[in-house]
Image (cartoon, rainbow, N blue to C red):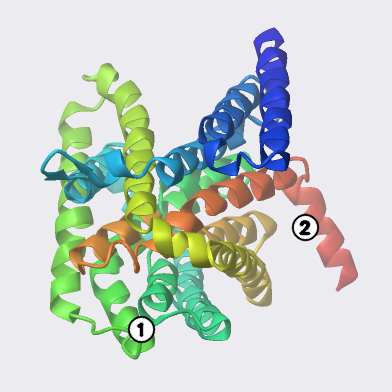
Amino acid sequence: MKNSRIFLVGSALAIIILIVMLVIGLGESTGPVLVLFFLFLSLAARGHNTFKGFSFAILIFGAVSLSMFYPEPFVQIGSFQMKKLIVPLLQIIMFGMGTAMSFNDFVGVIKMPKGVLVGLVCQFTIMPILGFSIASLFGFSAEIAAGVVLIGSSPSGLASNVMAYLAKANVALSVTLTAVATLLAPLMTPTLMEFFAGEFVPIDFWGMMWSIIKMVILPIIGGLLFNHFFHGKTPWLDKAMPILSMAGITLIIMVITAAGRDSLLSIGLFLIVAAILHNAAGYFLGYWGCRLFKMDERDCRTIALEVGMQNGGLASGIALEMGKVATVGLAPAVFGPWMNISGSSLALYWRDKDPEKKEEVIENLK
């Protein structure tokens, strides 16, 4: 706790220095100070039980700031194009996702058919429709708009499982929904992209399907098999994979941010507003959509998080495979950090709200 206070003071000093530099006209030199602010704030949050869940998301903002001010090393080092790292990193992350799962996770489809069906229908209808509507409303250029639709057409990721645990939701249902939605992604994501984004950019249905199989399905199957045969035999891997995954996600976002820096400088604020609207509407409609089907409070929380939080890494990988990482990939790069912050906030809010008492209140209102 003492170190947390020190880092909090450091972040406060950094923001004061930043403001002073902006006032005296040194805005272009504020990069290091801004990065230090986010770094100190992240370390401060990590040392506090209530705000620990925000630590990684804050660190991502620091990484984005670094790549915005100093994009060159994240675009190219020597003759090596950094964007070539995106797919291998995503495959490592998906392998790690597989090692954190088991074949029993898919049994949930039989045990909780209603929750899985409602969750999948909400996820693959609400979010792509919202993505298309918001992209059209904001009048984004074709490839930026396609990126907004892409993030809405992607399945949920492992982050939603963590948030479900924090929110006292149905973790088993969350894990099952993530697993099934991910397996359906090779079919659903290209189909939704072709239907909603086809007017923005040409969509290669079969090419996109193979990209998702290569980037997601095969590594996850490899992780599942590894977990099945070597579960408990490699504790070092269990500790290393979350760190590798977080590092991989961070680097992917930095590479995409650097590649699309010029576009972000011109439309970044609008993309942030779009991300907030898309995400908040996903939580709201996911939750109350479940209420319409008379599902209990824990399941409603679960599906709200599954609907509102997409796999930004997968969307980034697809954008790269499309050859449009600097444009189509921008929405996943912006939406991803925001989803972590909003998901953590909602989960922490729900954690203090007993789901059984909430259920009783709702029943009494009927």
For residue 216, which quarter of the picture? bottom left
Q: Is residue 55 visible?
A: yes
**What percent of the width, then of the height, locates residue 45?**
64, 27
As drawn, is 149 to the left or to the right of 187? right
Against 39, residue 87 (above or below) is below
Per the rendering, the mark at residue 197 is 1
Q: Nearer the viewer, residue 202 or 120?
A: 202
Q: Amino acid at mark 1?
A: Ala
For residue 243, which quarter of the picture? top left
Please state which of the two labelled residues, at mark 1 or mark 2, is closer to the viewer. 1
Q: Nearer the viewer, residue 355 or 215?
A: 215
Q: Residue at x 89, y 65 (%)?
A: 364
Per the rendering, the mark at residue 321 is none
Q: Residue at x 21, y 46 (%)?
A: 91
Q: Is residue 101 visible?
A: no
Q: Amino acid at mark 2?
A: Glu
Rate crowding at label 2 as few (under 14), some (14 to 19) or many (20 or more) other CA atoms within 10 Å: some
**What percent of the width, then of the height, locates residue 119?**
49, 67
**What percent of the width, then of the height, locates residue 31?**
52, 36
Q: Nearer the viewer, residue 64 or 195?
A: 64
As drawn, is 69 to the left or to the right of 239? right
According to the picture, the residue beneath numbered tag 2 turns out to be: 359
Give SS at disc 2.
Answer: helix
Q: Quadrant of the C terminus?
A: bottom right
Give SS at disc 1.
Answer: loop
Q: Real-space Cα distance between discs 1 and 2?
A: 39 Å
Q: Quadrant of the N terminus?
A: top right
Q: Are marks 1 and 2 in contact (CB under 8 Å)?
A: no
